[in-house]
Amino acid sequence: QKEVEQNSGPLSVPEGAIASLNCTYSDRVSQSFFWYRQYSGKSPELIMSIYSNGDKEDGRFTAQLNKASQYVSLLIRDSQPSDSATYLCAEQTGANNLFFGTGTRLTVIP
Amino acid sequence: DTGVSQDPRHKITKRGQNVTFRCDPISEHNRLYWYRQTLGQGPEFLTYFQNEAQLEKSRLLSDRFSAERPKGSFSTLEIQRTEQGDSAMYLCASSGTRGVETQYFGPGTRLLVL
């Protein structure tokens, strides 16, 4: 049984702070991981993908993958109120479909 | 706009009625996925197509659900004899086929079964 675990939150951070979102997964075979952002009532939009151990940076976002610990994280630097959303962690199986966690709700307080 | 499109965006129906949703993927993408999302949960995989072939179906896809992609372009998802438990957001995503490809989601169809 695949599991992707996320803290449902809500996670609140002040504007300008670093938000840290965490995700653990159970399937050691999983190779590809994705972070999606979802605003209330909207569909998920891709933030980052990561396939290799280590860090991957894109603007204010950094994804971290540790396959030995089966752990994926997303850091958001200089958090803005517009970053307030639910962040979904997903793993991609060999069959290509995505397996999602339940999401972490982030609130950035002005 | 060349993203994934879905129609309708909202559907209200009575229990027992049939509904059909349409998804138009990004034009160069030949993989198409359907997901269902209920409140407070992440999207759950339903089925996926590569071109016109339906290659995988989740156990969530009961016999009341059927999906087609007859010409390898747009896809339809039909739910027969809807139940209140079918109320959810139905999301379509598409991707290419070169190695690991990112899935891009459409705006979704929100279904409410009364």
Image (cartoon, rainbow, N blue to C red):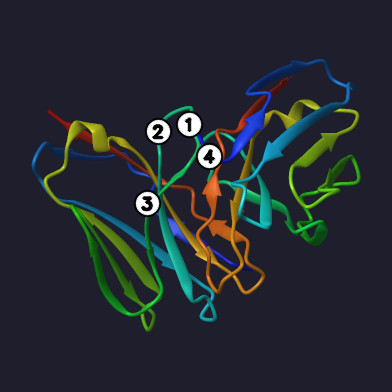
Do circles 3 and 4 both sit on a common chain? no
Q: Is residue B25 left or right of residue B65?
A: left
Choose mark 1 or mark 3, whichever is in front.
1
How many angstroms separate mark 4 from mark 1 (CA)? 18 Å
Q: Is residue A69 left or right of residue B99?
A: left
The residue labelled by disc 2 is A39
The residue labelled by disc 1 is A42
Sequence-wise, the earlier of marks 1 and 3 is 3
Element type where label 3 sits in the image: loop
Circle 4 Cα neighbour tier, 10 Å, few/some/many (<14 / 14–19 / ≥20): few
Amino acid residing under circle 3: Asn
How many angstroms separate mark 1 from mark 3 (CA)? 21 Å
Do circles 3 and 2 both sit on a common chain? yes
How many angstroms separate mark 3 from mark 2 (CA)? 17 Å
Amino acid residing under circle 4: Thr
The answer to whether one can see residue B114 in this image is no
Q: Residue at x 79, y 56 (%)?
A: B59
Element type where label 4 sits in the image: loop
Circle 3 Cα neighbour tier, 10 Å, few/some/many (<14 / 14–19 / ≥20): some
Contact (Cβ within 8 Å) of mark 1 with mark 3? no
x, y percent for residue B96: 59, 61
**Chain ID for label 3?**
A
The residue labelled by disc 4 is B2
How many angstroms separate mark 3 from mark 4 (CA)? 34 Å
Element type where label 1 sits in the image: loop
